[in-house]
Image: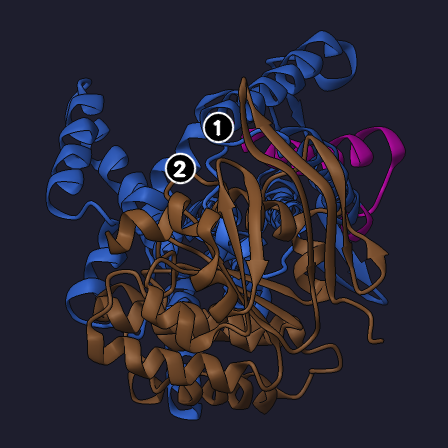
Amino acid sequence: MTQPLLTTSGLSRDFGGLRAVDNADFSLMPGEIRAIIGPNGAGKTTFVGLVCGRILPSSGTINFVGADITTLPAYRRVRLGIAYTFQVTSVFANLSAYDNVALSVQRTLTDGRSRGAVRTGAMKALEQVGLADRAGTPAGQLAYGHQRLLEVAMGLALQPRLLILDEPTQGLSDGEIEGFVALIREIARDATVLIIEHNMPVVMQLAHRITVFDVGRIIAEGDPAEIRANAQVQEAYLGAAHG
Amino acid sequence: MTEASTARVYGLHAAVVAVLFALNFLLPDYHHGLFARILVLATFAMGYNLLFGYAGLLSLGHAMFFAAGLYGSGLAITYLGFGVPAAFIAGLVCGALLALVVGLLALRTSGVAFMIVTMMFAQALLLTIVYFNQWTGGDQGLVLQQASRIVTIGNASVDLTVPTVRYVAALVLFAVVLFATLAIVRSRFGRVLVAIRENEERTRMLGYDTFANKLAAIVLSGVFCAAAGAAYALLFGYVGSNFASVQYSILPLLWVLAGGAATTLGPLIGTLFIYYVTDIASSYTSAWLLIVGVALILLVLFAPKGILGAVRKRWIRWLP
């Protein structure tokens, strides 16, 4: 049996009287594409926020590749290989697309005193998402869909072991979504992908397994077919969406 | 980014330094003296700009770093009999240590709280200087004797009180800090500082220890400002507590805003501009503050990003 890449046990987070994440036991195998779905306010973003360290848990533990990272600051987790792309696009608007990605690349270069290394790495990441010809454009002037791609390129350039994507297809056109799905498949060849997504066709196409959140709890987990057939899930979520 | 633009950028900065050197021989006495002072104060402004313009941290207490250099070197000469080079280094060390301690404490805050905390530390230093007036001379200050401001290297001696020597020494300091700033802002570290200014949370989520980077920026900024302070003491021979007052915390902010924050040459332009507006206005009227105020309002209205900021936006995009 291979070791799970990520496990959480009894993970909880309270905001005042509200329990946003409630006793979540979760594990993720290397190489997986895992989708997290659930109604608005189910605790999905809080949960991944706990995993990547933007929010500290009220109780419970988080393990990443066998090490306890529960109290590790966010930037240290990024260095261990957990990359997070924001739900609300937050590229550096006044920096060029190139500089945005170069920030990721230069951090991952441990031996990298060589001048060309940053350029090579940055251009590679931009090419992967198809933005190489926009390298010099200030990120704030890119089209919205391109900003989302840049956000992914920044995550990719960190060479993560776990890439967390928070609603990456939100606000994209159908054509752009198609390209996105292909891109994520390609990324998943090197990295484990954890994706929060509302778009069901995207989830069903991409995910190997799906975890369903509702009011802070994990209510179901399984492959797409199982989730589709799960009565509890239909009631909590799909029922409302599919009538 | 490309080879050509690197050559262009360094060429421009070298040309500015060359023009300033030529002015040493061309300026009439009065302006020659003014320029020497402006070059030292512009160095102070460059130190401020590194923290405020690039890393986006607005400090209202930078007078303390200038004063650390000023008193660090001035007191070392007066009481410890240090020579000029040793005194200069003493000033730098004082600035670096003060910046490290203040940075460790002040960086626990951000935004308005950071401004208040830095201002408070600067006030504490000012009061300390005044309190120990039997050594510091209090608000009277100390005058460094001409004999203590002569550098001897082997048989040759350089007298820093000679106007031309003073001008060239100020220019050397200015040029070193200018090119150091340029190298920093074009480096990977500089890119991280700008990223922190733009979006600190995002920078952290790219794996950067933003606290450590900001601390490094404060220490570098403190050292540059202390270098200006130490040079001021050595070149002009006066060490006074008014340089530790709030006024000298606000002035570098003003110079940087006028010249253009986050531009390498902005601090020079801003210092020149404000200094000359003040100088010319005060020769015509006692209400010179009114004229300076109007000039600032015009600047805010028509060039909110400062003089060089506006130039970069409209004409020369590649300005660093």
Judge whether B317 appears above or below A35 on screen: below
Residue range in magenta is B60-86
Residue A148 is drawn in which quadrant? Answer: bottom left
> What's the CA distance linking mark 1 and mark 2?
8 Å
Chain letter for the brown part: A
| Figure disc tally | 2
**In which quadrant of the rendered image does the N terminus of chain A lie?**
bottom right
Judge whether B132 appears above or below A21 on screen: above
- The residue tagged 2 is B253
**Near-viewer residue (B73 or B319):** B319
Check chain identity for marks 1 and 2: say if they share one: yes
Secondary structure state at the residue bearing disc 2: helix
| Kind of residue indicated by mark 2 | Leu
**Near-viewer residue (A209 or B223):** A209
Q: Looking at the picture, how far across and down is residue B269, in whole percent?
A: 32, 54
> Does B129 sit left or right of B243 as displayed?
right
**Near-viewer residue (B282 or A23):** A23
The colour scheme applied to this rendered structure is by chain
Q: Looking at the picture, how far across and down is residue B265, in whole percent?
A: 38, 60
- The residue tagged 1 is B60
Judge whether B266 appears above or below B179 on screen: above
Q: Looking at the picture, how far across and down is residue B320, in whole percent?
A: 38, 68
Q: Colour of chain B?
A: blue
Q: The numbered mark 1 sits on a residue in which chain? A: B
Residue B62 is one of the magenta-drawn residues:
yes
Residue A170 is one of the magenta-drawn residues:
no
Query: Any mark on residue A58, and which?
Result: none
